[in-house]
Image (tube, helix red, strand yellow):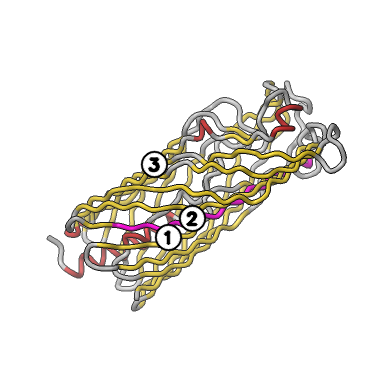
Amino acid sequence: MLGEEDMYRFSIAAAAALAVWTTSVDAGGIDRSGQPIGPLFEPGNYVEFSFRSASPDVSGVGAATGPTPGAATGDSLDGFGLFGTALKFSVNDKIDTAFIFDQPFGADLAYPPSLYFASGAVARLRSNAFTGIVRYKFNDNFSVYGGLRQQSMKASVVVPYVAGYTAAGANDNQLGYLVGAAFERADIALRVALTYFSPIEHNLSTVETSALTPPGGLTSDTTIETPQAINLDFQTGIAPGTLLFGGVRWVEWSKFEIAPTHFAAIAFGAPLVSFSDYRFTYTLGVGRKLNDRWAIAGQVVHEPQVGGFASNLSPVDGYTSVGLGVTYTQDNMKLQAGVSHTWVGDATTALFGVPAGDFSDNTALGFGMKVGFSF
């Protein structure tokens, strides 16, 4: 059994681990936040605010079989920032509640002017999610939880190389849910949590224009289903003041696509964006207490490549990231910061089934900060 001081060491090491967790750049698909529920397990009452940013450097050249062989694409992905906040209440010794805001999915692509065929193409996708969760503790070891997610989404795109096509999808709000269970042992700082996130189907009222549409364009509904996902998160003490943590995230990207009506008609049935197969993302890290105020942590995140053609509007396939984080604790406040470096997986894009662009040797930098208060 561990004493009170050892448990304090574990908790502060866990806080450092979370600092790193929030800085990874999710290069696969449009997955960005990883849909975190960590605040639900904070002791007592708790509030936090977080920000993280990513600066990708993703470029390629025209494939030999493409319309612009050897032409440089320029940097195709813009940097972005993500905000998050969470509020957790301990109702009694059996029931906890949490309210979490995150920005789970997004895209920021913009090909600069060049000789590459996709020059001038732009894709933007934004989402916000508000999640309410209730947790019931059967005893000190087992608990279950569930809740609702209200998610909003909007999107816009410019595709000059397909008849000067543009589209703008209006903001749409829909509901989904999550359910999960956790096992904990306080004496060794062990926690294993398994969480399922339902798919959420959006219907965006979309105005499409191209060289083939009448003035003012065409209006239709575009269905976008954000995928179902499962998160398996764990942590355990491995020595006084040292915490091992990690997780596995599964996302069913095989059912995701964006296919506005007019675009599909002029592109021979091809969607604007789609991803093949499901994806697994693996995380493993170690947190270590340095003294009563400071702790550090390091982690590795890996998402294997799935192969096949990548979308011209998302020219990446898998990634490997390393990160370092630090936590400073004083009284009821903890301040966290972390940085990460990501090696983005090589990808080949296609145009009408023929290789069009080769993207390789790309990287991204990430930075994150979080401040939390217990009350």
Would you say the residues marked 2 and 1 are in contact, meaning their CB atoms lie under 8 Å apart?
yes
Q: CA distance from mark 3 to mark 2?
A: 20 Å
Please name the residue shown 57% across and 25% down the image.
Answer: 308
Would you say residue 93 is visible in this rendering?
yes
Label disc, if present, on residue 19 of the rendered structure: 1
Assign the magenta stretch its main secondary structure.
Answer: strand
Please report the bounds of the magenta region as a residue range: 119-135
Instruction: Determine if the magenta segment contains residue 128.
Output: yes
Please report whichever mark, 3 or 2, sits nearer to the chain's N-terminal start.
Answer: 2
Q: CA distance from mark 2 to mark 1?
A: 7 Å
Please name the residue shown 59% across and 37% down the image.
Answer: 316
Q: Please state which of the two labelled residues, at mark 3 or mark 2, is closer to the viewer.
A: 3
Q: Position of residue 145 (x, y in %)?
A: 31, 53
Please name the residue shown 32% across and 67% down the image.
Answer: 290
Instruction: Determine if the magenta segment contains residue 60.
Output: no
Q: CA distance from mark 1 to mark 3?
A: 21 Å
> What element does badge 2 sit on?
loop
Label disc, if present, on residue 23 of the rendered structure: 2
Q: Position of residue 29 (x, y in %)?
A: 55, 39
Label disc, if present, on residue 154 of the rendered structure: none
Q: In the image, what residue type sits under mark 2?
A: Thr
Q: In the image, what residue type sits under mark 3?
A: Ile
Q: According to the image, label 3 marks what residue?
A: 230
Q: In the image, what residue type sits under mark 1?
A: Ala
- As drawn, 262 above or below 141: above
**365 sits left or right of 108 in the view:** left
Q: Residues within 10 Å of mark 2 (few under 14, many from 20)?
A: many
